[in-house]
Image (cartoon, rainbow, N blue to C red):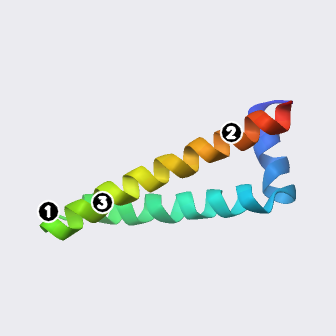
Amino acid sequence: MKEEETMSVLRNENEEYRKLEEDHRKLDQALDAMHKKKYLTTDEEVEKKRMQKQKLQYKDRMAQIIRDHKH
């Protein structure tokens, strides 16, 4: 099974994967909005870094779920 097919199956069958993917997408949209700003406050910079780390954690967990599903 190809990875895209696996992801499609997981979207339908795995609630954790579906939630992680949705949260990852929301963070991506929020980060895109931040990137459009000319300047960020110090608090916004801190929040941006936090969101980037969280997004990476979601991506890592989704990759782990995919690997587990394949085995």
Q: Identify the amino acid type marked 2.
A: Gln
Query: Quadrant of residue 4 in the image?
Result: top right
- Between tags 1 and 3, which lies in front? 3
Tell me how far mark 2 sits from mark 1, CA to CA.
36 Å
Give the labeled residue for mark 2: 64
Where does the image place residue 13, in percent across and percent down from the top left?
A: 87, 57
Considering depth in this image, is 58 or 30 the residue closer to the camera?
58
Check contact, mark 1 vs mark 3: CB within 8 A.
Answer: no
Number of the label disc, if any, that sits on residue 38: 1
Q: Secondary structure at mark 2?
A: helix
Residue depicted at 22% across the width and 67% down the height: 44
- Mark 1 is surrounded, within 10 Å at the Cα level, by few (under 14), some (14 to 19) or many (20 or more) other residues, namely few
Residue depicted at 56% across the width and 46% down the height: 59
Which quadrant of the figure contains the N terminus? Answer: top right
Where does the image place residue 7, in percent across and percent down from the top left?
A: 76, 45
- Between tags 3 and 2, which lies in front? 2
Which quadrant of the figure contains the C terminus? Answer: top right
Number of the label disc, if any, that sits on residue 48: 3
Tell me how far mark 1 sits from mark 3, CA to CA.
14 Å
Whether residue 2 is situated above or below residue 32 in the rendered picture = above
Whether residue 28 is situated above or below residue 9 in the rendered picture = below
Q: Identify the amino acid type marked 3.
A: Lys
Q: Secondary structure at mark 3?
A: helix
Considering depth in this image, is 57 or 18 the residue closer to the camera?
57
Q: Counting residues from the N terminus, which is met first, the one under dot 2 or under dot 1? A: 1
- Mark 2 is surrounded, within 10 Å at the Cα level, by few (under 14), some (14 to 19) or many (20 or more) other residues, namely few
Q: Secondary structure at mark 1?
A: loop
Left of 38 or right of it: where is 20? right
Q: Identify the amino acid type marked 1.
A: Lys
